[in-house]
Image: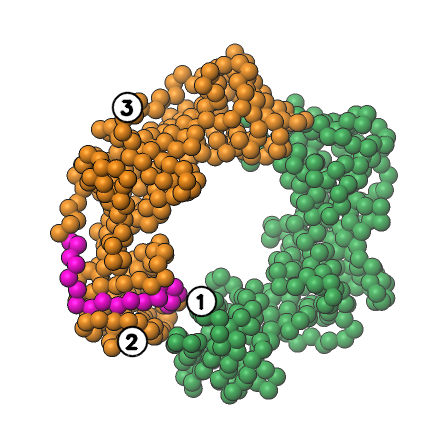
Chain colours: A orange, B green
Amino acid sequence: MKISCQKSDLLNGVNIVMKAVPAKSTMPILECLIIEASGQGIKLIANDMEIGIETFVNGMVLETGSVALNAKVFSEIIRRLPDNEVNIFTDDNYVTEITCEKSRFSIMGRSGEEFPKLPAIIKERPLTLSQFTLKEIIRQTVFSISDNESNKIMTGELFDIKKNELRVISLDGHRISIRKVMLKEEYEDKKVIIPGKTLNEISKILSGEASSNADIYFSDKHALFEFDDTVVVTRLIEGEYYRIDQMLSSDYETKISINKKELLSCIERATLLIRETEKKPIIINISGNNFELSVNTSLGSMKEDIDIAMEGKDIIIGFNPRFLTEALRVIDDEIVDIYLINPKAPCFIRDKEQTYIYLILPVNIHVRSE
Amino acid sequence: MKISCQKSDLLNGVNIVMKAVPAKSTMPILECLIIEASGQGIKLIANDMEIGIETFVNGMVLETGSVALNAKVFSEIIRRLPDNEVNIFTDDNYVTEITCEKSRFSIMGRSGEEFPKLPAIIKERPLTLSQFTLKEIIRQTVFSISDNESNKIMTGELFDIKKNELRVISLDGHRISIRKVMLKEEYEDKKVIIPGKTLNEISKILSGEASSNADIYFSDKHALFEFDDTVVVTRLIEGEYYRIDQMLSSDYETKISINKKELLSCIERATLLIRETEKKPIIINISGNNFELSVNTSLGSMKEDIDIAMEGKDIIIGFNPRFLTEALRVIDDEIVDIYLINPKAPCFIRDKEQTYIYLILPVNIHVRSE
C-alpha cells in the first residue's frame, strides 16, 4: 500500500475515526485503525463493536492495499508531523514507513483481516436533518441520560418518528428531556433507542453547519449516520422505551417567566455552599412577582431575589440544583417559562411550541431540610 | 468589621493570597485567609508556613476589625458574584455577611488570633529587579529543580549575588540551569537558596511588566519579595549549595548552531515513540554539516535530518529527550549554540554572553541502546 496526502486532511480523518477506538480492549486489533487504499480512495476505519466509523481522506492512492496500525501511536505521529505532504508506504510484512519533509518514521503494522467489518445496512429512505439540527438536539437532551449501565434503556435516547415529527427523549429517573423537530417529509412511524455515548461521539464529529445534511438509516439492530465523507454505524439498544406521554401534563398552578442567565448564575452561586456529600436542595419561594432562591448548609447560607413575571399561586419548592442548571444551560432562549403544580409534582420548563420540554422532579424539602 | 470594594479588585487580591493556602493542612486555621481592615486599608493574608502572602485591596474600611474565613469557600463565592460592589460585614461572633446586588451570603468565620503572623524582616537595601526580569529568570531555571524532597537543597534555587551580578542556578543531578543578570548597583556578596515551589508561586503573581519593579530583602532564614500591593515572605533552604563552577568548562570539541524550533519539534516527534517505562535515549549523529536525530524503540523507529552550522569534530551522542526539550522551550533565541566534548561529557547550550547556560549530561548509548 502506498498513499500520499496532506497532513491536515489525514489528521482530520484520524481525529474522526479515533472516536471509535477504545482506550483499552481485550481484542488488541480494536486498538488499531485501518487504512484502506482502493479505487474508491483512502479510507480510515475504526470499530469498538458499539460504534464503527469510516471516513474518506483526500489524497492519492499510489498502490492499493490495507494495513492495521496502532491508532494511538499513529495518531500522535500524524499530529506532530510538519504541515506538509505525508507519504505512507506499507511493505508485504506490514512494516509501515511514514515520511514527511525530513522526518522518517517506521512502525510495525499488521494485517487488517481479522478487523471486524462494519455491519452492512441497506440505505433506503434516510431520515434527513441538517448537521446543525442534529448536533443541537443531541446537545439539548444527552445530558439527562443515565450513566448507570444496569438500566441499559436509560443510557440511550429515544428517537421517536411520527409522520413529519421527530421527538428525541432522554430520562434518568429524576428528569426527562424532550426536543421536537418538524421534518420536511412524512416518514413511517418508528421508535429506536440509540446509545447516548454514540450520540455524544457523533455530535463531536458533526460540523454543525446548517447548510449540510446528515442522513440517518435504520436497520433492526443498527443505525447508520452519514454526513460529509463519514459513516458512523451504531448498535441500537434493545427493549421498549418508557411511556412518557402520561407524565406530560399541561396543567399548572403557577407559571413564571424568568431571565435564564440571571437564574443560572444565581443557582451556580447557591451551589457553592452545597457539598457533594450533603446533597442539600435549593429552595425556591415564589410569591407575588418575587422569586427568592435560598440555600442553607453546613458551610453557610445564601439568599437571592430575582425579578419575574408570574401567574397563579404562590409556591415554595426544592430542587437538586444540578438538574435545573443542566437544563437551563442548553436552552437558547433569553427568557424561560417555568410551570409548577405543587411542591411534590414535577416542574416543566418549556417553550410555547413545546420544541423543548424539560421535566424535573422536585426534592421534598419538608422532609429533607427542616 | 465592615468593608466595601469592587468584586474585581477583591477577586484579584484573593487569587494572589490563595497561592499560600494549602489544599489540606493539619492546622485548619491555615486553610483560612485573613481579612484585616485597619487604618492602612483592606489587607488579605494567607500563610502555609513555607510561604506567606499579604496583599492590599482597593476599597473602603467602614469599620475596622479582622476575620479568618475558609479560603476555598470565600474565594469561590467571590468568583461567582456579579461584577459590582461587594460589602462584607462581620459581627462579634464572626458570622460574615457577603452581599452583592441581590445576593446575600452568610458564612461562619472565626477569629484570626491563632493565625501565624508573617515573619518580620527588616527592609534594608533591597535587591531590585524589574518584574519582567524576575519572572523570566524563574521561568528559565525552575524547571530543573528536583522534586525529590529527600535532597532539600536540590528543591531550591541558588540566588548568588556578587557585586553587580546575580546568578540564579538550579540543578537536579542530571542537568544544571544558570541565568545571569547584570544589576544596576553593586551589592554585598550573598548566597541564598529559595524553595523552587515558592518561586513558582511568585512567578504566577508577578505581572511580568518591565516597567514595574520587585524588591527582594533577605534575613538569615527568610526572603521577602515586595511588588505592586503585595508582599511574599518565604523560608530559605538551609545548607550549602553545590559548587558548580568547576563543572562549567568552556572547552569544546564540537560546536553547532541550530534552529531552535526545528530541533524542538524534531525531538517532540521522536519522543512519541518512547514509552515512559522504556527510557530510551534519542541519538544525535553530527557529521559534516548534517545533524541526524534518531530513535529506535519497541514501537518503531524514526530518523530526521536538520541543517546546521558546525565547527570541530563529528560526534554521536545520546540524550534523555526531556532534558533537551525543557531547556530549549525556555530559550528565546531563534538559533541556539550547542557545545559538545565527547559522548560521555556534558553538553552545554549557551549564548555568547553566557546570560544562560544549560548543562545536560548525556546518556551512555553504547551500553543502553545497542
Q: Which mark is residue B80?
A: 1
**Residue most extreme to the top:** A92
Residue A264 on the magenta span: yes
Q: Quadrant of the C terminus of chain A?
A: bottom left
Q: Amino acid at mark 3?
A: Ile
Ranked by sequence position, the earlier of labels 2 and 3 is 3
Vertical arrangement, residue B290 with respect to residue B164, above or below: above
Q: What whole-number distance in Å separates the C-alpha atoms at marks 1 and 2?
A: 22 Å
Residue A194 vs residue B201: left or right? left
Is residue A273 something one can see in this rendering? no
Which of the two discs, 1 and 3, sits closer to the camera? Answer: 3
Q: Position of residue B361 (x, y in %)?
A: 72, 38
The image quarter containing residue B200 is bottom right
- Magenta extent: A247-267
What kind of residue is marked 2?
Answer: Asn
Badge 2: chain ID: A
Chain holding disc 1:
B
Q: Position of residue B160 (x, y in %)?
A: 78, 59
Residue drawn 26% across and 44% down? A182
**Tags 1 and 3 on a common chain:** no
The kind of residue on which mark 1 rests is Arg
Q: Residue at x 86, y 30 (%)?
A: B312
Image check: A29 left or right of B352? left
Residue A331 in the magenta stretch? The answer is no
Residue neighbourhood size for the residue with mark 2, other residues' Cα within 10 Å, grouped as few (<14), some (14–19), many (≥20): some
Q: Which mark is residue A122?
A: 3
Nearer to us in this view, B317 or B241: B317
Q: Mark 3 and mark 1 in contact (Cβ < 8 Å)?
A: no
Q: For mark 2, what is the residue?
A: A290
